[in-house]
Image (tube, rainbow, N blue to C red):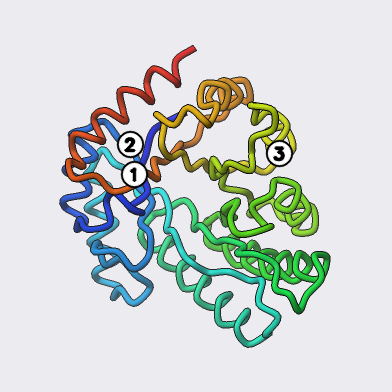
Amino acid sequence: MMLGAVTYEILKDWDVETILKNLEETGFQAVELRTQHKHGVEPSLAPEDRARLRARFERSKVRLLSYGTVCEFHSPDADVRRKNVEEAKRFIDLAHDTGAWGIKVRPNGIPKELTREAAFAQIAACLRELGDYGGGRGVEIWVEVHGAQTQEPEACAAIMRLTRHDQVGLCWNSNPTDIRNGSVKWAFDLLKPWIKNVHINELANPAYPWRELFTLLRQARYERYTLCEARASREPERFLRWYAALWKELARP
């Protein structure tokens, strides 16, 4: 497995050049650009700027891994869902043009107007549409384990079973709801068939069994990225060096 970072939150105030410089210097290998941050990489980017961005990352040691969108598909309003699907498609096009592997989307709870089953069915329908669209462009769809009720591992497993699309998988999010009796093994085993990306956060938090998670990832032969999604720091470069050092200790057998 490899170490990367999400721009949310610690990198949110850096432009692309600063992101690349600091991640290269601190040993990070990839980045997920979250929408609405200072880097300014959005679906509105002109074709020539997309080409320049792709070329810049190709010259870097840091991979442009993915785009962190806020697209979500739980609304009971069909027009709202359609707006989110179309926005996600624009991010898929951006990922294709700039060489990113995937886009991150998310469930964000279950509206009171819908049953659990109805909410999951409409989320899955949107994900299948995006899977078809992304498949034609070589872009994966990563569903973050996120939101009240929907961050429960059983909920994400149910959504994935309904989605049934090879281009769509999960982004493990290292949530407190993963833990039962001090262990995340039950949740990892449940979601393992669909894990395509991993977000990790505060590695010094003793409440989360990080060593167990890293062991499970190694045992599953997970060879993709684990992305730091940590709180902002007053000394971000120093924090990233510390984070990379701790990650190496957890990642080794």
Task: Indicate which disc, 3 or 2, sits on the residue closer to the N terminus.
Answer: 2
Nearest to the observer: residue 52 or residue 19: 19
Q: Are marks 2 and 1 in contact (CB under 8 Å)?
A: yes
Task: Provide the secondary structure element on which disc 1 rests.
Answer: strand
Q: Amino acid at mark 1?
A: Arg
Q: Which residue is mark 2?
A: 29
Q: Which residue is mark 3?
A: 193
From what the image shows, is residue 8 above or below residue 228?
A: below
Q: Quadrant of residue 60?
A: top left
Q: Are marks 3 and 1 in contact (CB under 8 Å)?
A: no
> What label sits on residue 78 in the rendered view?
none
Give the CA separation, mark 3 to mark 1. Answer: 25 Å
Q: Residues within 10 Å of mark 2 (few under 14, many from 20)?
A: many
Give the CA separation, mark 2 to mark 1. Answer: 6 Å
Give the CA separation, mark 3 to mark 2. Answer: 24 Å
The residue depicted at 52 percent of the width and 72 percent of the height is 89
